[in-house]
Amino acid sequence: MTGSEGRNDPIAPKPPELTSPWRTPARADLQAEARAFARDTVLPLADELDRHKAEMPRTLIDAMAEKGWFGITIPAEHGGLGLGVFEYCLVSEELARAWLSVGSILARGQGLGTQTLDAERRSDLLRRSARGAWIGSISLSEPNAGSDLAGVQTRAVRDGEHWVLSGTKRWAGFAKGADFVEVLARTREPEPGEARSAGLEPFLVLKERDSFPTGMTGRVIDKIGYHGFQTFELTLDGVRVPESDRLTGLYGDQGADADAGGFASVQRGLNIARVHTAARAVGVARAAVEDSQAYLQERVQFGHPIGDFQALRFALADMAAEVAQARAYWHQVAHLLDQGEPAESESAMVKLLATEMAVRVTNQAMQLHGGNGYTTERRVERYWRDARLTTIFEGTSEIQRRIISDRMLPRPGS
């Protein structure tokens, strides 16, 4: 019996389950909770708001905060869940399966903006971060400094007990809605023989939600995807930051060494950000596979569901295999990071493979949906638009290839 003969009910997509050696009861419960939240709460909002380029409501952010997800990686003694990169990515994959930006908003917690020199204040900020009351925006890139962060030219000039920041920053997501903006700025030029990144430090710019502080203005960048929160180009003109708000690290890196310099902490944080991006890309690609599986049974041509045609069945099989491969790899790399390994090459590899996979899989999903996929009536066009960004942010695919190849074939003097 072949084709649709004898099949009475459509076969529902079966979301992946955690398998050995990564599965624990606690992780399985966390995954199930995030999956149900994504399906029942996030997906309807995404379907309603994304096509209008609208922002996710604050009530959605508050609901995630109540679950403790902004403090997944924050130690329990500071009010967090005390879990690792693995659990952080596990939740983010599920949320991104519904809407990429919701999988991303969690990165604005996790101890971001807490690396102050004062231990008592740091503890207080960590508790606020863990409960979703200290959500930030991170502003590294500039119009002429993206992949090459060592080229940052925003200036921080010392004025007594303050620093005065001036320059232009670009790609600051959620900057207006945030409680603070972390800004990477140059305090001095590198000395002869120093790395180009010498003199770069992160600063904490405090602000009220839904407004900008004195000296900072923002222009919304009109994106083709990644809706759910706005992304800004920021102009800083004499923004004053007290010395107490010069930070020792970025990305919530609790292990940052103040003597290592701010830029070194950026590099550490980017390894976590890259595996996080891989997990989000897997979530988006998985959505495309699951929707395609349903559509191939729904759409009838030539008297058969199009899922009866071998070419389309094989395309779906290839898509599913690629998603499973990328998921298995992010599991492995997240585990390495949780074990304290730097995993710099591995983080670059998983980011490269997972995001390029997401572009291929969502593109193929558009093809399987035919003309219907090229409308806003189907979710697949949203997956397609969002997947394309994953190969660009947190370091382009070309930058990942450079990281990998430079560690395989070191250049003289590097």
Image (tube, helix red, strand yellow):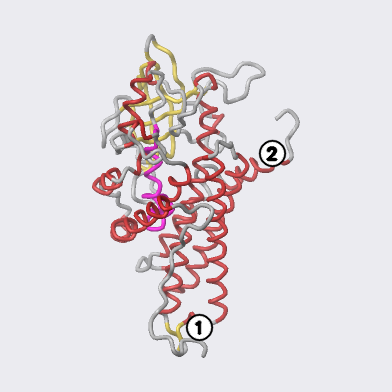
* Label 2 sits on residue: 406
Q: Secondary structure at mark 1?
A: helix
Residue shown at 29% from the left, 43% from the top: 65
**Which badge, 2 or 1, comes first in the chain's sequence?**
1
Q: Is the residue 255 above or below the residue 288 in the image?
A: above
**Which numbered tag is attached to residue 20?**
none
> Which region shows up in magenta?
91-112
Is mark 2 in CB contact (under 8 Å) with mark 1?
no
Q: Is residue 72 placed above or below 353 in the rendered structure?
A: above
Q: Position of residue 136 (x, y in %)?
A: 35, 35
Q: CA distance from mark 2 to mark 1?
A: 47 Å
Amino acid carrying mark 1 in the image: Asp
Q: Which residue is mark 1?
A: 308
User: Tag 1: Cα neighbours inside 10 Å, few (<14), some, or many (≥20)?
Assistant: some
Q: Is residue 219 visible?
A: no
State the residue at coordinates (45%, 29%). Answer: 254
Residue 309 highlighted magenta (yes or no):
no
Q: Residue at x 45, y 52 (%)?
A: 24
Residue lying at the far right of the rendered structure: 412
The front one of 24 and 219 is 24
- Residue 174 visible from this viewpoint: yes
